[in-house]
Image: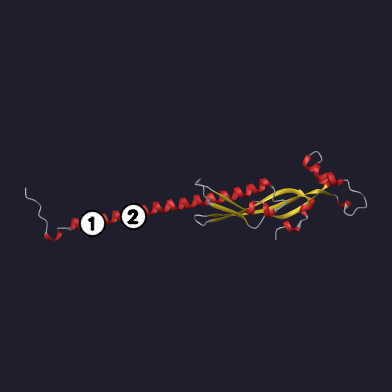
Amino acid sequence: MKPLALPKRSKGIVLLQSMILMIMLFLIAIASFNMGRQNTIVAGNMQHKAEVLTAANQAVEEVISATTFIDNPDAALSGNMATYDVNGDGNDDITVTLSPRPCVKKAQTIKNSELDLTNTNDLSCALGANQNLGVEGAASGNSLCANSIWEITAVAEDLATGGQVEVTTGVGVRISADNAGNTANMCP
């Protein structure tokens, strides 16, 4: 059997085709690596955002649970700022500030006729219901309490990335009628 003789022009074409194929495979590998890296970066950014959002919500929960913001909105958090270490390395990672300070969006005095005197919370509001006749405001029918809606805004910043999240929460609180009339606590 006689070996197949190739024309002189076709010698080296296999080498050229294999080089082109190798370059295409190399480019596909680089593109796959970059896509995987970008997906990792996106997932990391989403995790940072979730941590910042969680810190902001935690600060709002601390404010609501302490209720010191009712008497002194400027002292809702110590210095209206809280810091959180989310990765446990002993360094603060997220700073949360209350900006603007907690304020009253709406306050409405509760009428004595609207109170349920079997409820201990309502009973404490009705203690001032027995007013003397002839005293100014005695016939208003108002109790000692008011229903109020407070707005609490927390701005959290990730110190590593500089990303910020703002969380605004409304909370209904029963306050004294005197506090309801305090214009210093009203929202602008």
Distance CA(mark 1)–CA(mark 2): 17 Å
For the point 39% across and 51% down, which residue is it? 36
Which is nearer the eye, 176 or 26?
Answer: 176
Check the image and name the residue furthest to the top: 118
Q: What element carries label 2?
A: helix
The amino acid marked with disc number 1 is Met
Quadrant assignment, res 18? bottom left
Residue in the picture at 65% in, 49% down: 63
Of 67 and 27, the residue lying toward us: 67
Give the amino acid at mark 2.
Answer: Ile
Please give the count of numbered marks on the rendered protein.
Answer: 2
Image position of 125 (left or right of 89): right
Relative horizontal placement of residue 17, taking residue 181 as reference (left or right): left
Check disc 2 and report the residue beneath it: 30
**Residue annotated with mark 1:** 19
The residue lying at 79 percent from left, 43 percent from top is 122
The residue located at (66%, 45%) in the rendering is 65
Camera-side mark, 1 or 2:
2
| Farthest-out residue, front | 90
Percent coordinates x, y for residue 16 in the rendering? 21, 58
